[in-house]
Image (tube, rainbow, N blue to C red):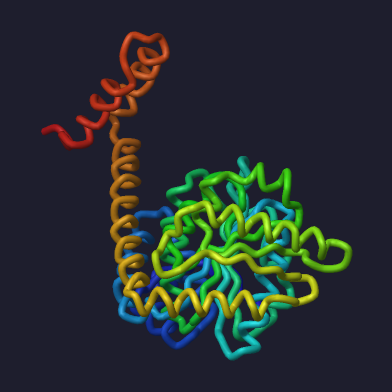
Amino acid sequence: MKSGGGRLTGSRGADPAVLAARIRAGDRPALARGITLIESTRADHQEAAQALLTMLLPDTGRAVRLGLSGAPGVGKSTFTEALGTFLTGQGHRVAVLAIDPSSARSGGSILGDKTRMELLARDPNAFIRPSPAGGTLGGVARRTREAMLLTEAAGFDVVLVETVGVGQSETAVADMVDMFLLLLSPGGGDELQGIKRGIMELADLVVVNKADGDLVPAAKRAAMEYRAALHLMRPKSAHWTPEVKLASALKGEGIAEVWAAVEAHRKALSAAGDLDRARAAQAQAWMWTEIREGLFAALKGNAEAARLIPRLEAEVAAGAMTPTVAAKRLLALVFAGPKG
């Protein structure tokens, strides 16, 4: 069954209490409307969204949160669909939050992940929500976190967050999930040199995709090289050593082994208390992200700052003022509050 975005029509459409009850009952259109509500930038919608999240917070936190990323062309959507289909076949309810690249002109999604996962989109135990990456990384991370909570409240026990796979979105997603899965192609060698150390350090599990046909030997060589590279890096947890798996999303091979590694990771971290500690730290980091974004929004909305910004930018560009002094002058306007 396909899941789409829901329009907010009238006050009843955005009623937090009504939406909360329907989302708890597993109403998919209500879930779509709830996500549309939290993605809205309207002040009244944002107020309703936070009321909705507060109501549903006790119903969240029990799902497996898995982030997936990889370079464009590695087969993220095919892998996500293969994993999601495998999981629904095992009795799980799967929500996919796919972050798409955004059009610089309209802000809308370019690739449309739901249209690229047609089989999973028709699965009654799956929910797919593509969201445009937007202009700011912070906005993506904030709204994706909130969407994840809504899907958990709706009864989905596995949440897959698929990133754009370019830029710094991987760091944001790794900070909101329990496990970060890095999808790689069977290149090895030169490709290994091109992978930034930072993205490898984020990975809890590396999957070499497209390990089929003539690419099997190359995939096996790549897996050996990635294992060697991971061995030189410090694990994020003392209770889990990142693994490398081979898979062919196209043929559905290796998917069960990947999920077994996800379950082993969750079991190990839960037993050590690392999972609870990580989620608590993520919640605190989320709070500070909201504070930073709130300060920036307050600055943009300050009329005096709007008049002052062009002059400060000109002075900074001319070298007449340091960026730090200019920033402090602007922030002083926000902290001082409205005059009179």
Q: Residue at x 61, y 89 (%)?
A: 90
Q: Position of residue 102 (x, y in %)?
A: 61, 48
Q: Position of residue 258 (x, y in %)?
A: 62, 74
Q: Is residue 5 visible?
A: no
Q: Position of residue 206 (x, y in %)?
A: 61, 62
Would you say 4 lies left or right of 331 here? right
Would you say 212 lies left or right of 106 here? right
Q: Residue furthest bottom?
A: 91
Q: Residue at x 29, y 72 (%)?
A: 54
Is residue 190 positioned above or below 216 on the image? Answer: above
Q: Is residue 109 visible?
A: yes
Q: Position of residue 253 (x, y in %)?
A: 75, 76
Residue 338: which quarter of the image?
top left
Residue 299: which quarter of the image?
top left
Q: Residue furthest left?
A: 340
Is residue 150 positioned above or below 102 on the image? Answer: below
Depth check: give the residue in front, 227 or 247.
227
